[in-house]
Amino acid sequence: MPVLCETDEVIPGEMPGPHWQDSVVFPVSSDQIEQLHRRFKQLSGDQPTIRKENFNNVPDLELNPIRSKIVRAFFDNRNLRKGSSGLADEINFEDFLTIMSYFRPIDTTLGEEQVELSRKEKLKFLFHMYDSDSDGRITLEEYRNVVEELLSGNPHIEKESARSIADGAMMEAASVCVGQMEPDQVYEGITFEDFLKIWQGIDIETKMHIRFLNMETIALCH
């Protein structure tokens, strides 16, 4: 893929439309838009859209334990705000901005209610990474496996420790979900509301970091 220099200009016709802000979850400045546009052009090879295979040669993703889940998240219609299920075959720059906006840090100068809403949006994005079949639920085993995968990518955590922490996370999730069920209720998986309870009090901005496209650190998980 061509490597574009910092002086590459954004082509006006490729910029997002007048209502693109409606789909962006977190604010993105004009400077950040230009920087992201350069990354988009690198990924697409100067094409107007990106497909999953365009992510194959991204160095920051090659060794990432949840690489496939991260790439899939870019094409998830739920994250793109284009539907409640399914994957897009390709995304344009406006779609790319929408997804990258999830990775922006939460503005702590906002009011408490707005900060909580922003945090909820980040957790919804993470929930979608677990809920690959878009049925609104994830199994305890799926939850455990993804936690272990995420922790395994941390060079400061040994494999056995990652497995132990993941087991603990699964047991904690079970206590939250199953412990609140009625005696005759059948467990069908972790809902998003359960997920919010599981992550209550966890600082998602600092606990787990994922590097992507040499941009900024993306905080996604405990």
Image: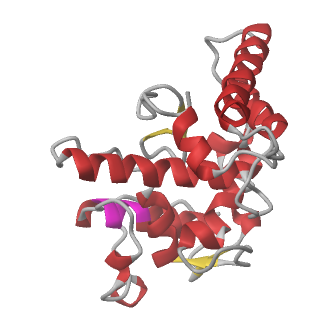
Using residue 58 as the reference point, say whether residue 23 is left or right of it. Answer: left
The quarter of the rendered structure image containing the N terminus is bottom right
Q: Residue at x 49, y 25 (%)?
A: 207
Magenta span contains residue 33? yes
Closest to the observer: 88 or 53?
88
Please, is residue 40 above or below residue 112 in the view? Answer: below
Residue 142, percent from left and from top:
81, 40
Q: Is residue 152 visible?
A: yes
Q: Residue at x 61, y 43 (%)?
A: 194
Magenta span contains residue 25? no
Please, is residue 141 above or below residue 42 in the view? Answer: above
Q: Residue at x 44, y 68 (%)?
A: 97
Please, is residue 114 above or below residue 36 in the view? Answer: above
Identify the image quadrant of residue 139: top right
| Magenta region, residue range | 32-36
- Report the residue that reaches farthest toward the front: 183
Closest to the observer: 182 or 5?
182
